[in-house]
Amino acid sequence: MTVKLAVLLSGGGTTLQNFIDRIADGRLDAEIAIVVSSNPRAGGIERARKAGLAVEVVDRRNFPDDRQLSEAITAVIERYDFDLVALGGFLRMYVFPERLRGRVLNTHPGPLPQYGGQGMYGHHVHEAVLAAGEKESAASVIIADNEAYDHGPVLVEKRVPVMPDDTPETLAARVFAAECEAFPEAVELIARRLGLTASAP
């Protein structure tokens, strides 16, 4: 059985593109049921449309807080047939209903919990890792909960070395390459755990 994804994003959609590419070449047995952007100008919208995917915008500016934004997003995605929610560069906290507990995955470009939390996204994470003199960073995928940003049990973590001459940009590229492996792996892992797909022989 093919696992069906609802992908939430706010930006360029590189995580979405990785899913699209891996599904297309057979490396990921999944289907993208719906893409929702919280930003009407997000580059991920065009990526979704180019791939022929259903895409809707729930503009974060129309809602006073993350909870009401999340309720509107849930109302949208539940019009589609999906198994898992994948947060791919979604820059708000998705507050999901209890019925989706254990089915919401979030990717983060750094080790958790040390480099997570509100405001810790993108280059902010890489700058913090470098400023702390860490020898390693990581691409982390968690089973999200409703407690806080980037909070929940880590499902997959891919460690990456920090090089002496790294900049936030070079470290970001290495972490994203690891995320391109980690997030599909996490989707397959949770899908097997939930009985959404056949186990590997």
Image: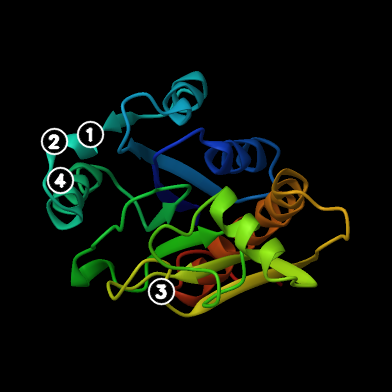
Sequence-first tag of 3 and 4: 4
Q: Name the residue under label 4.
A: 72
Question: Callout 2: helix, strand or loop?
Answer: helix
Q: In which quarter of the image is residue 199?
A: bottom right
Relative side of 32 to 184, left or right:
left
| Sequence-earlier tag: 3 or 1 | 1
Residue 184 falls left or right of residue 10: right
Q: Mark 2 points at which residue?
A: 62
For label 1, the crowd category at 10 Å Cα-Cα, with few meaning under 14, some 14 to 19 and many 20 or more, is some
Residue 89, above or below 83: above
Q: Where is residue 21 in the image (x, y as percent from the top left)?
A: 65, 36
Tell me the element at label 1: loop
Tag in front: 3 or 4: 3
The amino acid marked with disc number 2 is Asn
In the rendered structure, which amino acid carries the disc numbered 4? Ala
Q: How many labels does the image show?
A: 4
Position in image of residue 184 (x %, y %) = 61, 56
Which residue occupies the foreground of this view, 128 or 92?
128
Amino acid type shown at disc 1: Asp
| Mark 4, other Cα within 10 Å: few <14 / some 14–19 / many ≥20 | some
- Numbered mark located on residue 59 in the image: 1
Q: Which residue is drawn at 50% across and 52% down?
A: 2
Kindly indicate the quadrant of the structure image that contains residue 135: bottom right
